[in-house]
Amino acid sequence: MNRRKSREVAMKLLFEMSINKESYEEIIENFKEYTDVDLNDVDMSYITRVLAGIHEHGVEIDKNIEKHLIKWKLDRLSKMNLAILRISTYEILFEEEIPSVVSVNEGIELAKKYGEDASPAFINGILAKMI
């Protein structure tokens, strides 16, 4: 199973949750039912753990992000950047087997692929302060 691909799926589902306001359980079930992604290529237990963890620890994760924002508020961030920051922050705080530098690097890579031009530097700046 590919962790990078699993992280990317988790980010997309988290982004979808922010738009559709569905629970992580519903989002995961819909993903399993309607995706064209080969489910053997992704780690569904990781995806579920991340989405459940963000749901459970959302306040703590958001406070941690907010304390590293300079002249920004959480609600002003793009939904994509916020999804990337939440996943990376969750990993830094709660996934002990994933080194923090890996979480930062993966967040930057997601920002390069899905964010705006300034997103990788923005994500890097916030996550680097966390670790």
Image: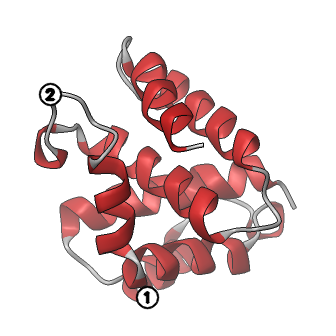
Q: Amino acid at mark 1?
A: Glu
In this rendering, is residue 79 above or below 7?
above
* Left or right: 108 as drawn, with respect to 102: left
- The residues bearing labels 1 and 2 have C-alpha atoms spaced at a distance of 34 Å
Label 2 neighbourhood size at 10 Å, few (<14), some (14-19), many (20+)? Answer: few
Can see residue 36?
no
Q: Quadrant of the C terminus?
A: top right
Task: Identify the secondary structure beneath mark 1.
Answer: helix
Residue with the most extreme right position: 1
Residue 21, how many percent across, how many down?
Answer: 19, 73
Q: Quadrant of the N terminus?
A: bottom right
| Closer-to-camera residue (105/8) | 105
- For disc 1, the marked residue is 25
* Left or right: 62 as drawn, with respect to 110: left
Residue at the spot x=57%, y=38% of the render?
Answer: 107
Residue 62, how many percent across, how many down?
Answer: 31, 60
Residue 57, how many percent across, how many down?
Answer: 41, 78
- Kindly report which numbered mark, 1 or 2, lies closer to the viewer in this rendering: 2
- For disc 2, the marked residue is 71
Residue at the spot x=59%, y=79% of the render?
Answer: 48
